[in-house]
Image: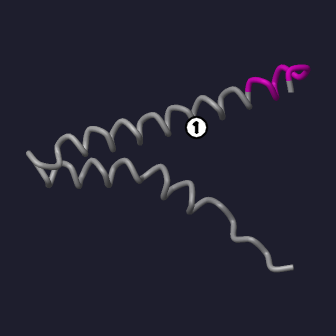
């Protein structure tokens, strides 16, 4: 991939987007855990927000074909 600059940039962009998505989700889950006893509604809303990237990723994956 390193030999082709365009492909290298696309792979790099994809990895960055993945890293930001995972970091954001884990941060929101950590914050939601801290808020759980003080503001349970906010904690549920933050946990729901943290699962949005996971749900979007699952929705875009095509179903496997049976062979």
Q: Secondary structure at mark 1?
A: helix
* Residue pictured at 13% horizontal, 53% vertical: 40
- 37 over 4 or under it: above or below: below
Residue 62 locus on image (x, y percent)? 69, 65
Give the left or right position of residue 33, taking residue 63 as reference: left
The question of residue 3 being in magenta is answered with yes
The stretch of residues the image draws in magenta is: 2-9
32 or 11: nearer the eye? 32
The percent position of residue 47, horizontal first and vertical second, equals 30, 51
Where, by quadrant of the figure, is residue 65 drawn? bottom right
**Is 20 located above or below residue 32 in the figure?**
above
What colouring method underlies this structural image?
A: one colour
Horizontal arrangement in the rendering, residue 32 relative to residue 4 (left or right): left
- The quarter of the rendered structure image containing the C terminus is bottom right
Question: In which quadrant is the N terminus drawn?
Answer: top right
Name the residue that disc number 1 marks: 18
Residue 55's x, y, as percent? 48, 58
Q: Residue furthest right?
A: 3
Residue 59, by quadrant, is bottom right
Judge whether 17 appears above or below 50 on screen. Answer: above
Write the residue at 32% across / 55% down.
48
- 13, above or below 49, in the image: above
Image point 33% across, 44% down: which residue?
A: 29
Answer with left or right where residue 38 lies relative to residue 53: left
Q: Residue at x 27, y 47 (%)?
A: 46
Asked if the stretch drawn in magenta spans residue 44, the answer is no
Q: Position of residue 22 (x, y in %)?
A: 49, 39
Q: How many marks?
A: 1
Question: What is the chief secondary structure element of the magenta stretch?
Answer: helix
């Amino acid at each position: 991939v390193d030999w082709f600059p365009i492909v290298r940039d696309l792979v790099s962009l994809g990895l960055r987007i993945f890293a930001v998505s995972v970091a954001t989700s884990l941060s929101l889950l950590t914050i939601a855990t801290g808020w759980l006893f003080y503001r349970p509604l906010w904690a549920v809303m933050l946990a729901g927000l943290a699962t949005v990237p996971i749900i979007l990723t699952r929705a875009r994956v095509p179903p496997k074909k049976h062979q």
